[in-house]
Amino acid sequence: MGDKMEYGLENNILVAKLDDGEDLFGSLEDIMDEIDPKSAVVLSGIGMLRDFKVGFYNRDTGEYEWEEFTEPKELLSLNGSITEEGSMHLHVEIGGRDHDVSGGHLDGGKVFNVTELTLLVFKELTLSRKRDEELDMYLLSVR
């Protein structure tokens, strides 16, 4: 269908186009490796995804409750953070053929048709994850 992932960087704003069949997380890892920033935030993502999971974090159990999607869904919104270690914390809002909308923590995903992303990349600011003992979670740390 399309060519290969393409992206452009101006100042600290990156715009990327991912093509049908590309792995969302793998493509983001490739981009981060190529441009070598300290960290980034995903400002927006639209297009379509398939083969992904959406999770809700249950604080009582300390586990995510996952719903798996294999069929294509409209990617209505994607945002989150990418740390210097490459850890990605992404949230998604998706819509179905019947215009149902759901969302949560994103795990995995293959591009269906096309996905467009906008990132804010940092050369100096460092985002990382630190373990919070009380919540028993890894939370964002900014330095």
Image: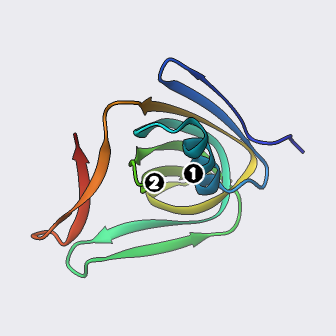
Q: What residue does disc 1 label?
A: 29
Position of the C terminus, as image quadrant, is: top left
User: Would residue 103 be seen by someone viewing this image from the given angle?
Assistant: yes
C-alpha span from label 2 to label 1: 7 Å
Instruction: Measuring from the top left, give residue 87's x and y in whole percent.
Output: 42, 57
Q: Quadrant of residue 89?
A: bottom left
Q: In terms of depth relative to the viewer, which is nearer, 14 or 43?
A: 14
Note whether residue 98 is visible: no
Q: Looking at this rendering, what residue extends furthest in the top direction?
A: 11
Amino acid type for the residue under numbered disc 2: Gly
Query: Which residue sits furthest right?
Result: 1
Position of residue 83 measured from the top left corner of the image (x, y, whole percent): 38, 49
What type is the residue that disc 1 sits on? Glu
Residue 86: image tag: 2
Badge 2 vs badge 1, beta-carbon distance below 8 Å = yes
- Residue drawn at x 50%, y 44% is 78
Q: Is residue 19 left or right of residue 115?
A: right
- Residue at horizontal 74%, vertical 41%? 5
Image quadrant occupied by the N terminus: top right
Q: Secondary structure at mark 2?
A: loop
Left or right of 15, for residue 121: left
Rendered residue at 63%/56% (across/down): 26
Image color mode: rainbow
Instruction: Classify mark 2: residues with Cα within 10 Å, few (<14), some (14-19) or many (20+).
Output: some
Side (left or right) of 101 relative to 24: left
62 relative to 138, above or below: below
- Residue 71, how many percent across, how many down? 71, 64
What residue is at 70 percent from the left and 58 percent from the top? Answer: 72
Q: Position of residue 108 (x, y in %)?
A: 58, 63
Q: Please tell me which of labels 2 and 1 falls first in the chain.
A: 1
Mark 1 lies on a secondary structure that is helix
